[in-house]
Amino acid sequence: MIEVGTTIPSHQFDIDRALLKQYADASGDHNPIHQDEAFAKSVGLPDVIAHGMLTMALAGKYISDWAGGPQNVKEFSARFTKPVIVPAGKSVDLTVSATVIEVTGTGVRLEISATSAGVKVLGMAKAFVEQGN
Amino acid sequence: MLNPDSVGRTFAGVDVITVTQEEINSFAAAIGEKNTSVAPPTFSIRISLREFESILTKPEIGLDWTRLVHGDQKFELFRPIVAGDSFTTSATIENYKIAAGNEIVTVRSDLFSGAEKVVSSWSTLVVRA
């Protein structure tokens, strides 16, 4: 039974430089801060960072899976509070979980948590989904 | 600096954008989504971000895209995007402010299939001081 307060089991995604390249090609976002360590550092970042929209896309996958498919996600919003830092040759985690905060006649509103290396990377992340179609 | 006179303006997209199955497949593959019968929920960023860049960097609007970071993002999905969809687009500069020297602009994108609105999305973009 889904009710306010129901929690959805968390899922861990792994993010590495190869995934950043794959997402850049898939999304058309080739900003060098997501590829080029020297460039990222030259603009004051600690290292290469993941696209905020990659983080959100992975959280969207998590929500889609729970909702029974991407077609059931009706609203989705998030704030990019901290970057996901992706060092060379390493894989970092993106850990996503969610809680039901509203149940309506047509669907369910979720509050989503996303962290990387224990740091919250999405804020105010919410989705409205219709389940099971 | 963004030209403040541009706030509230809506820009019609120049081109009709047709979504291919290959584009959906590559976006889905990047996030591990095996269902490619519809596009993932955030797929339309592929269309809207490029559109925002072309509008906001026009000389008369003047945003500096090189110092840009993405502040927040919202999608309203009226139906899923599928391969073969052909969209006309419009983009609206909804809000602009300067906080601690950072320029903060909120832009809205609407994708239409004929008269049907398929996706509305909002991006808040921050040009760092």
Image (tube, coloured by chain):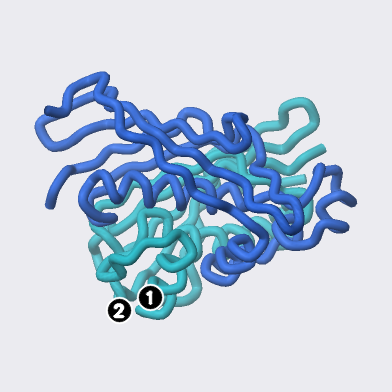
Q: Residue at x 22, y 50 (%)?
A: A72
Task: Please tell me in which quadrant of the rendered image residue A39 appears.
Answer: bottom right
On what subunit does the disc labeled 1 rest?
A: B
* Label whose residue precedes the other's in the sequence (1 or 2): 1
- Do discs 1 and 2 belong to a common subunit? yes
A127 versus B99 height, above or below: below
Quadrant of the rendering where the C terminus of chain B is positioned: top right
The reply to whether residue A83 is visible in this rendering is yes
Question: How far from the left and from the top, in percent, is residue B126?
Answer: 68, 41
Task: Please tell me in which quadrant of the rendered image residue B50 appears.
Answer: bottom right
On what subunit does the disc labeled 2 rest?
A: B
Question: Are the residues flagged by discs 1 and 2 in contact, CB closer than 8 Å?
Answer: yes
The chain that appears blue in the image is A
Question: How far from the left and from the top, in percent, is residue A105?
Answer: 10, 31
Quadrant of the rendering where the N terminus of chain B is positioned: top right
The chain that appears cyan in the image is B
Residue closer to the observer: B86 or B72: B72
**Amino acid residing under circle 1:** Val
Q: Secondary structure at mark 2?
A: loop
Task: Please tell me in which quadrant of the rendered image residue A118 appears.
Answer: top right
**Amino acid residing under circle 2:** Gly
Spatial distance from mark 1 to mark 2, Cα to Cα? 5 Å
Residue closer to the observer: B16 or A131: A131
The residue tagged 2 is B84
The residue tagged 1 is B19
What count of labels does the image hold? 2
Q: Residue at x 40, y 34 (%)?
A: A97
Answer left or right for B91 relative to A4.
Answer: right
A34 versus B19 height, above or below: above
Q: Secondary structure at mark 1?
A: loop
